[in-house]
Amino acid sequence: MTEHFWKTSISKVEPNKIVVRGYDLIQLIGRYSYTDLTYLLWRGELPSRSHSQMMNALLTACLEHSLNAPSVDAAIFVASSGVPLQTAVSAGVAAMGDLHGGAIEDSAKMLQEGVATNMPLHDTATSILTTWKSSRKRLPGYGHPTHTDDPRTKRLLEVADETKVSGRHVELALEIANLTDKIFSKHLILNVDGCIAAIASDMGFDWRLGKGFFIVSRTPGLIAHVYEQMYFDKPYKAPHWNEIEYSGPAERKVPEP
Amino acid sequence: MTEHFWKTSISKVEPNKIVVRGYDLIQLIGRYSYTDLTYLLWRGELPSRSHSQMMNALLTACLEHSLNAPSVDAAIFVASSGVPLQTAVSAGVAAMGDLHGGAIEDSAKMLQEGVATNMPLHDTATSILTTWKSSRKRLPGYGHPTHTDDPRTKRLLEVADETKVSGRHVELALEIANLTDKIFSKHLILNVDGCIAAIASDMGFDWRLGKGFFIVSRTPGLIAHVYEQMYFDKPYKAPHWNEIEYSGPAERKVPEP
Amino acid sequence: MTEHFWKTSISKVEPNKIVVRGYDLIQLIGRYSYTDLTYLLWRGELPSRSHSQMMNALLTACLEHSLNAPSVDAAIFVASSGVPLQTAVSAGVAAMGDLHGGAIEDSAKMLQEGVATNMPLHDTATSILTTWKSSRKRLPGYGHPTHTDDPRTKRLLEVADETKVSGRHVELALEIANLTDKIFSKHLILNVDGCIAAIASDMGFDWRLGKGFFIVSRTPGLIAHVYEQMYFDKPYKAPHWNEIEYSGPAERKVPEP
Amino acid sequence: MTEHFWKTSISKVEPNKIVVRGYDLIQLIGRYSYTDLTYLLWRGELPSRSHSQMMNALLTACLEHSLNAPSVDAAIFVASSGVPLQTAVSAGVAAMGDLHGGAIEDSAKMLQEGVATNMPLHDTATSILTTWKSSRKRLPGYGHPTHTDDPRTKRLLEVADETKVSGRHVELALEIANLTDKIFSKHLILNVDGCIAAIASDMGFDWRLGKGFFIVSRTPGLIAHVYEQMYFDKPYKAPHWNEIEYSGPAERKVPEP
C-alpha cells in the first residue's frame, strides 16, 4: 500500500467541516440547488445561471419510462425478494448499460471527436455516417423503438436555445439526423440520449461522464418503483411455471456416473 | 402470470408521449427542477415553493463525505477492475445499508411513531430514549464518529425555519437530543441523518422512503469518485500482499483425501 | 486507519505462494474438489468423506428453478442492457433475499436455537409452531408455492441417511412438519430450504452462512441464463408499452410553477 | 410482450418436478457433483470422467487471493455497512471486470481464434504477439503483479496432462509464453487466467463463458470474507478522515448564486 492509497480531489472531511471542491458544504446548502452541486461535483466549478437551467432540463428529460425499461424491471424483481430498498435500486443502476442510457456516452464521444476535427459540419456528419454504416453497429443517439419523433428532443433543444448553450455539437447532431435519409436510406430521429449528449458536449462535459446523466436522471424513479413494489405489490415476483416456455432437450434418462 | 403482471402508478409511455403521475413530462421539462420532479415521483404531487426549497436543502446536506464512506470505497475498488461506470456506481448504492444512511429511515420511523402517540413531546422523548437504552441498540440519527457538532444539522434547521416546514417531528428530534444527557449520561448530537428524518417527516414523507434521500444525495458524488478512479488513477486497486495481516491457522500439511 | 486495517484469517498471498486456511493451495488442486474447498473456506477445515458427499448434495439440491425465480428474472433484464456477464450475475445474486433462498438462514437459526434448548423435540416443535403462529409470519423452510411435495427434500433426506449426517436438527425439522396439521390446521411440507437448513445444522454449520448455500447453488445457473440472454436472445428486454397497465392519476394540466 | 417473452433452454419447472437440460434434477442429486452439474448447465451435457476431474481443478485453481483482490475489498466495505450477506457478495461479483478475472475470457478468445486459423502454432503465436505488441494493450493471460512464476499454472498443466485434456490451445498458450522473450524483449509467464483459458478451450468451452469460471471459483471465498467482516470485524469500514489525502482546490469563498 503506497502512501497515497487514499486520495481524492473531490472533497475533504474534518471534524465539523466538509469541503467540496474547495467550498464549505454548509455555505452551499440552501443557496445552491442539488443540480448545481451535481455540476460542481462533476466539473469542479459551480454552474453559471444558464448552465444551471440547462442542467435541470438535461437531468429531467429522461426521468421516467415506466416499466418499458430493463433497469426498472430488474429492480422490481429484486425488490420483490425480501431485500432492503437500496439493494434493488442498485440492481437497477447496474442495468444502465451500453444499450440502456449508454448511448449518451457513445454519442457524446462521437460528437466531440467530430467537432474536434474542425472540418465543415456537413463533411464531418457525412464521414461519421459513412463510418458507422460500414461498421454495421447502431448509430448511438438516433432512432427509438417506441417514439417516432422523440418529444423530449424538441423540448430540450428549445431550452438549449433559450439558455444559449446550443453550439457546434448540437449543430453536428442535427446535421447527422438530416443526412440519415440520404446515407442510411431511412430517417433516424435524434433521440433524447443523442440530444443530451450534444447539449452536454456544448456545455463542455467530458463524454466519459455521459452515463452519469442517465444514472442521476433515473435514480428517483427507480426508488419510486422499488418502493411501490416493496410496499404496494405482492412479494416474490416471477412468471408462473406454466407461462415459461422450455426450449431445451426433451426429458432423458440420467446416465450412470 | 396474471393479467396485471406489469402495472405501475408512476408513469405511462405511449409513442411520442410520457406521462408522469398524470403530468405530460414535456410540459415539466425546463419549468420544474430535478428536485421538484423527485418530489413528484415520491409523493405523487408537485411541491409547494417552500417544500421545493427544503427538498433541495435535504438532498444536498449529505452530498459528500470523501473516502470516509464505505459506499465510496466499495465503488472505487469496483471501478478499478475494468468495468463500466454504472457497475461501480451500483456497488456504491448497494453499500448504503442500515449503518450508512439507513439511520434516516430508522429515525423517521421512530419520530413518526412518536408524534403519532399525541402525547406531550417530553414524555414521548423520554419513552423513546428509555426503550432504546434498554434495547442496547444505537439510537438512529444521533451521535457521529467524526463530527462532534454536525454542522449540517444546524444549517438544515435554519432552512427549515426559513421555509416554515419545521413542526412536531423536528421538535421531538430536538427534545430527544436534549434528554440524552440525562438518560444516556452523555450528550448525543442530532446528526444529519436524524435531522433529515425529522424534517422529511414534517413534510409528510413516509419513513420507508428514508433511504431514498441518502441514495439520491450521494449518487452524483459516487459518479464523480468512480470517474476519478477510472480515468485519473491506477487500475486494479488493492492492498499489496505484504500489507495484509493473515490471522488464520499456521501452514500445515495437506492430508490425504 | 489502524495498523490492522487489512486483516483476514482466510488466506495469505506471497509471491508464488497462496495459503488457504493453512494449506498450500497448489497441493489442494486436483486432489480436493471444489465442494471440499468451499467447505474449507466456510468451516476452516477439510470435510470428512461423508461431509464431502453431503455437501455436494446440498449444493446441487436447489441448483435451478428456471425463470420461476426473481433472481434469474432480474439477471436476464440486466443482461439484455449491454453489460458484461458478471454485472448481470451480480444483480441476480443481489436478489437472493429473505424471500428467495433466505429461508435457509432463518430456518437454520430456528432449528439451531430449538435443538440448543435440549428439551424433548416434540415440546420444542410445539413451542416453535405456537410462537410462529402468533407472530403471523411465514414459517421459514415450510410450504412451497409450486411444489406440493418438494421432491428435493425426500432425496436430500435419503443422502443424509446414507452419509449418516442426519441428527437432531433433521428430527426437529420433520417433527415440526408433522405438527403443522394440528397447530396450523393445514399441512406444511418441509421444503428444500428447510431441509438444507436442517442437514447443514447437523453438519455443524453456523446458521449465518445459510444464504451461502443458496448463492453457490444458484450461481452456475445464473451464469447460464445470463449467457443465454446475452448471446442467444434479443437485447433490451422489457414489456411493450401497451402491455403495461398504468394505475396512476388521470392526465392533468401542469400547474404554473 | 410477445408470446415467447419467458423462454429458456436451461431448465423446466412443474409441480414436484424440475428438469435440467433434459435430466430430472432428483436423479442427479447425490450421484453427480456440483462441478459436474455446473458443466451440465454451461455445456448442455454431463462431463466425461476426465472432464469432471479437470473441471474441479479449473474451478479451484483461482479459489482465493486474500484481500489482494478488488472484488474482496469491495465486498467487505459493503459488508460493513449493515446489509444482508448476499448484497455484499453481489458487489464482489460486480468487481470481476476485465482487469480482474476478465483475462480468462480475453485469453480464451485469442487462443480459440488462433487455433482456428489452422496455421502452424509457431506462426500463429508470432502473429498474435506482433499484433498485441503494436496494440500496446496488455496481453491477456500473461504476466502477474505478484507471482513471478504462477504456481497454479504448473499444477493445472499437470492435471491437464494426467486427464489427457491438453491439446492445441494449451500448446499455443505455451508457445506464446516462449516467444514473449524474443518479441516483447522480456519474459511473460503464462498466468492462471491464461492457463484456465487454454485448458477450457481444449475442453470445448465457448470463450464467452470465460468469466463464469472466475465467478464460480471466487464466490465461496467472497462469502467467507463477507461472513468474516459481518460477524467478526468492526462495522462501518472506512479510512479515518486524517488518512485521506485531499488533492482538490484549496478552500475558497462561496460566490453569490
Image: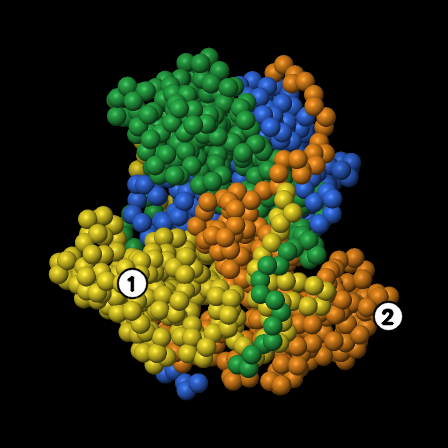
Chain colours: A yellow, B orange, C blue, D green
Locate residue C123, reporting x and y percent: 74, 40
Circle 2 marks a residue in which chain? B
Residue position for label 1: A115
Q: Residue at x 55, y 28 (%)?
A: D147
Q: Is residue C201 left or right of residue A171?
A: right
**Helix, strand or loop for disc 2:** helix
Taking depth in this image into account, of A201 and C28 the one nearest to the observer is A201
- Name the secondary structure under disc 1: helix
Q: Could you tell me residue A129's position as x and y percent?
A: 20, 56
- Residue count near mark 2 (Cα–Cα under 10 Å), binned few <14, some 14–19, many ≥20: few
Q: Residue C205 appears in which quarter of the rendering? A: top right
Q: Position of residue D160 (x, y in %)?
A: 45, 17
Q: Is D228 located above or below residue A153 in the figure?
A: above
Instruction: From the top left corner, tell me how far across and down residue D257 is, in percent.
Output: 53, 81
Confirm whether residue D43 shows in the render.
no
Q: Disc 2 residue type? A: Lys
- For mark 2, what is the residue? B182
Q: Along the line of sight, which residue is nearer the eye, D52 or A240?
A: D52
